[in-house]
Amino acid sequence: MINKIKRSLKKRKVKIFLLFLLCSGLAWFISNLSEDYVSNAVFNLEYVNVPDSLLLDKASKNEVNVKLRAVGFQFLGFNFRNKSVKIDLSRIETTTSKFYIPQEVYRRQIERQLPGSMTLLEMDRDTLFFDFLKLKSKEVPVRPQIKLGLVQNYLLDGDLVIEPEKITIKGPKEEIDTIQSVRSSQLDLNDLTADFARKAMIIKPQQLEHTTFSSESVSIKGKVARFSEKMIQVPIEVINLPEGTQIRTFPDSASILCKAKIKELRNLENSNFQVIADYVMTKGDDAKTLSLKLSKRPKNIYSANLLEAEVEFILKRE
């Protein structure tokens, strides 16, 4: 029994010793990290504020080696990830053929982004050089790719609404000069009986490597309505008759099959239509038929189709 107690006490002493050892080691580690050190680091360069008329194609370097004075905690962070600093290109210098930023200019930009406890001692002395592409912009229409499957006795009420109808593309002249329109991704809508609104992504052609779009997608909307059919009989009007003649057609009226919403069909009358036969268009003196043309129809109906393409006639001299 006594031996068990002694063993328990020994284990407890060991645990207490290890705890104090850990605490003292942690205190020593924190104390050291709080002191100033001089060490090397690498900063990633992030280029911002590129002039609107230019597109950055290539930079002479994307990172810079630096020597810093900083507390240990800050250097500890560099072991996991390089610090990123922004380089402002809005005031880039240029010669006839080169764009560049001198070392003293971008050094000042970097120094302004460092915390007060960090001092930049040394850094690469290279001038930064850049290659840019000159940009041009133009407005082009969006061509929707959509396949509609309407349930029987339903129709598309009006035109499709595309928002936006046009987008602005911006890129190098040689890329966008031949682009006259852009297409949306394919939409297949089946068994439609109600209004719809769908989003479709704009397809970016592979050759537009450096071109940006003002919008990445379009909204495609449409109204769907139920329709019915109605037959209208409309008198045939013959025009351009020779002087001193009369004409009679067989039949004397034409059948028009109309498709529209039920409300519009109820208000349809034959006076809303005009069917003409132009005598000048007859083929020779021995012609026996006249071609018919629907020259007037209401705009608010879906379709109106003549069921007869021509009629026979008898011409009489007065």
Image (cartoon, helix red, strand yellow):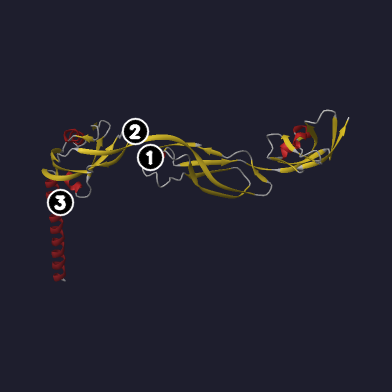
Q: Quarter of the image holding residue 161?
A: top right
Instruction: Give the structural element (helix, strand or loop) at label 2.
Output: loop
Answer yes or no: is residue 269 visible: no
Q: Nearer the viewer, residue 186 or 35?
A: 186
Q: Quarter of the image holding residue 263?
A: top right
Q: Quadrant of the C terminus?
A: top right
Horizontal relation, residue 204 to residue 24: left or right: right
Name which residue type carries label 1. Glu
Between tags 2 and 3, which lies in front?
2
Sequence-first disc among 2 and 3 = 3
Q: Quadrant of the N terminus?
A: bottom left
Q: Which residue is mark 2?
A: 53
Label 3 neighbourhood size at 10 Å, few (<14), some (14-19), many (20+)? few
Residue drawn at point x = 16 percent, y = 66 percent:
8
Name which residue type carries label 3. Leu
Q: Which residue is mark 3?
A: 26
> Residue 174 — which label?
1
Q: Where is residue 207 drawn, in percent x and y?
A: 40, 46
